[in-house]
Amino acid sequence: MTANPVSRYMAELIGTCILVLIGWGTAVLAGGDVGFIGVSLAFGSALLVLVYCLGPISGCHLNPAVTLCLALTRKFPAGNVLGYIASQCLGAILGGFIIYMIATGKAGFDVHQGFALNGFDEYSPKGYTMMACLITEVVMTALLLFVILSTTHASFSTGFAGIAIGFTLTAIHLMSIPVTNTSVNFARSLGVAIFHGGWALEQLWLFAVAQVIAVFLAMGMHCISCCKN
């Protein structure tokens, strides 16, 4: 990364906005037509492209857990953590606002029913319990972080990072959409919940806690992997 801090923050804001627009936008506006597979591919392919577009500028974190994990493993300056996370959350809110404005332009749209929000218990798409949703989010986020940490290893070919990360996010969505509507990214959860309010904001804590636990789990997995190599 050679860009100045302002350029990096703007890249994170714009990138997270685009990720929410394409991924979550597909779920809200076209989910009934493309299904779980289509939504999963939308998130994964959007991240894949963004890695190559924004990676040279900001590293293309687009996720508070990624920023925190890279900082704790000394692969990212700790002084930029708050700026990155703030940029990611603002970008997600901007993306959420754009989709909200589009979705509410259709007669009969109900933000309480068709907004692809992250939730647990009765607000889980398939009714999964709080514990099941927490485990899902921790494990899936840790998997994403483990893959990202692996792509920063000296032996990994950097030209394939976007492909590895993008396909991982696709696979994660395929598995976890029925459980939580898939977060693995607190900024994504916040950026859409804020336009719903109510239970969506009240349940945000689970996705924040899951991210923190996942960071340390992924660091442990990566450490074990490196030791074996």
Image (cartoon, rainbow, N blue to C red):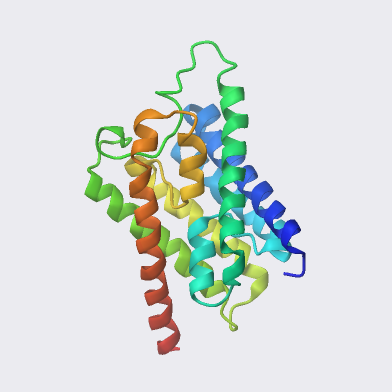
Left or right of residue 14, residue 145 in this image: left
Q: Nearer the viewer, residue 191 or 117?
A: 191
68 on left or right of 80? left
Where does residue 53 sit, x and y in percent of width and height? Answer: 72, 57
* Observer able to see residue 37: no
The residue at 63%/76% (across/down) is 157
Q: Is residue 137 left or right of residue 33?
A: left
Query: Residue 55's image quarter?
Result: bottom right
Say above or below: 147 vs 174: below
| x and y percentages locating residue 218 in the rendered image | 40, 69
Which residue is depicted at the point 34% across and 60% down?
139
Q: Quadrant of the C terminus?
A: bottom left
All told, the count of numbered labels is 0
209 shown above or below 116: below
Residue at point 38%, 82% (across, down): 224
Q: Quadrant of the N terminus?
A: bottom right
Q: Which residue is drawn at the image coordinates 61% and 57% (left, top)?
A: 83
Residue 127's x, y, as percent?
25, 36
**Residue 182 visible from this viewpoint:** yes
Question: Quadrant location of residue 203?
Answer: top left
Image position of 154 (left or right of 223): right
Quarter of the image holding residue 58? bottom right
Q: Residue furthest top?
A: 107
Look at the picture and state if 57 lies above or below 149.
above
In-front residue for pair 99/160: 99
Q: In front: 202, or 110?
A: 202
